[in-house]
Amino acid sequence: MASYQIECQVIQQPKDNTFNFIFETDDAETKKFHRNAKANNDIVCLLVVPFPPDLTLEDLIRPRNEKCGKVKVPNKFFIYRKWYTMCLGGVGRKNEQTSISRYISEQWRNEPQVVRDYYGALSIRAGKLFKERYGKVGIQTPDKNNKKKQKKMINNELLKNKT
């Protein structure tokens, strides 16, 4: 990553221990669940997202891991979000995606049109490279559901043969 001056802001979450879900069991015991397990942790946000992003087209078309096949290229907002979280990670700060999502979205809405257009153009270029490299179908990965369907079909055949 290029050297950018990263400025962060720490937002303290309310410590009121409110619960978003209540799960009632058959007995008298009631369990309460936080919507986000780390909801009471402080959130670290960027004051300014460095521009232009230090992302290559390869970063955008590469699958996250071996099990995950990428079938399409992220849109301009998801590229912005990826860069935002990379910048936070670069300064040793990480947040749960669910807790920081609204701040990223708010910052995205406040970006000038030139910045938003840049991310849009980046998405289009990455899309062209992706189609060039993998075609319209994208990266093929084994279908987990296909194995289940095969087992079900085999079981059905065995049942038919028994009767």
Image (tube, rainbow, N blue to C red):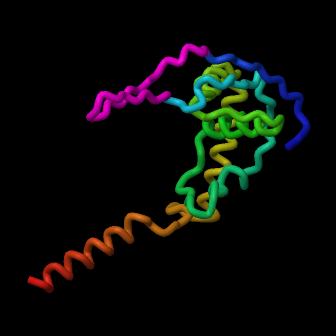
Which quadrant of the figure contains the N terminus?
top right
Q: Residue at x 83, y 23 (%)?
A: 7
- The secondary structure making up most of the magenta span is loop
Q: In the rendered view, would you say 82 is above or below 57?
A: above
Identify the magenta region: 14-34
Residue 92: horizontal and vertical position, in percent?
81, 36
From the viewer's perspective, tell me whether residue 96 is left or right of residue 159. Answer: right
Q: Provide residue 128's location: percent of width, then percent of height.
A: 63, 54
Residue lying at the far right in this picture: please name it. 3
Q: Is residue 8 left or right of residue 29?
A: right
Q: Is residue 64 above or below residue 111?
A: below
Q: What residue do we see at 58% from left, 26% from top?
A: 39
Residue drawn 63% across and 28% down? 100
Number of marks present in the image shown: 0
Q: Nearer the viewer, residue 45 or 27?
A: 27
Q: Quadrant of residue 101?
A: top right
The residue lying at 55 percent from left, 14 percent from top is: 16
